[in-house]
Image (tube, rainbow, N blue to C red):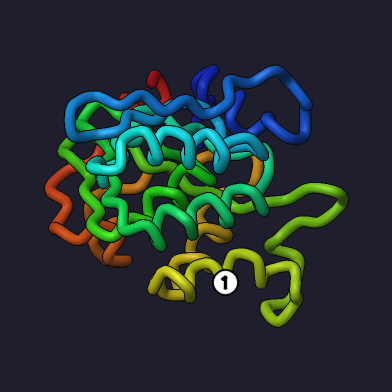
Amino acid sequence: MKPALSLLAASALCLVACAEPYSPTQFVAQGDQIVVTGAIDHTTLDTFREVAADNPQIKTLVLQSIEGSVDDDANVIFSREVRNRGFDTVVPSDGMVASGGTDLFLAGNRRILQPGACVGVHSWGGGGIIATELPEDDPEHDRYLDYYDDIGVSDDFYWYTLEVASEDEMHWMTAAEANSYDMATTRVARLGSTATCDAR
């Protein structure tokens, strides 16, 4: 949303542009939580609905490793459903969300970033469009701005993600940055370092 990227971060940034194989999201119920890994795509919402129907008592998603999405429209539709169903989101101390995964985290009713969690943001681009080259009133921004408005996230966060790193880079947020945008519903004590997150 810097030095060389890890294989994981680089593959996340290449999910769409390079059309490389990826691991779709998987949901595993564990006790009172559903652990989520993989990339968000057009199958994610249906898979989530199945797991939620089988485990109606669970209202917490643990985002263990969500490197991004291969379909931004599917991502915001899925994330809105997470919010509408009243789920909480947690990134554990050894967990990572980036790009569309960070948007999913923000959908949580209660949002927890455990000490050491990695949160990556960057700009977007594709199909000959570069977000930072568009005027602020361009309707291409609306997919994200409307989503943030729906979940109560300031537009300032969206513009920050465009400026802090280009579409082929990743910026790993600090706790101070996360707190300045009220990303979590409890104060963030510490996030993973750039070196730690690049290696994850």
The C terminus lies in quadrant: top left
List x then y, in percent, for residue 16: 73, 35
List x then y, in percent, for residue 172: 39, 41
Q: Is residue 159 visible?
A: yes
Residue most toward the right?
128
Front residue (pair 194, 126): 126
List x then y, in percent, for residue 67: 50, 32
189 sits left or right of 87 in the view: left
Q: Name above or below for residue 197 compared with residue 105.
A: above
Please rate how many residues cluster around mark 1, counting C-alpha atoms within 10 Å: few if below 14, some from 14 to 19, many from 20. Answer: some
Q: Is residue 177 visible?
A: no
Residue picked out by circle 1: 145
178 sits left or right of 160 in the view: left
- Residue at the (54%, 17%) spot, across then down: 7
Q: Name above or below for residue 141 compared with residue 129.
A: below
Q: Dividing the picture into quarters, in which one does residue 36 lie?
A: top left
Q: Amino acid at mark 1?
A: Leu
- Residue at the (41%, 28%) spot, across then down: 27
117 sits left or right of 107 in the view: left
Q: Name above or below for residue 162 compared with residue 125.
A: below
- Residue at the (67%, 53%) spot, across then down: 73
Element carrying mark 1: helix
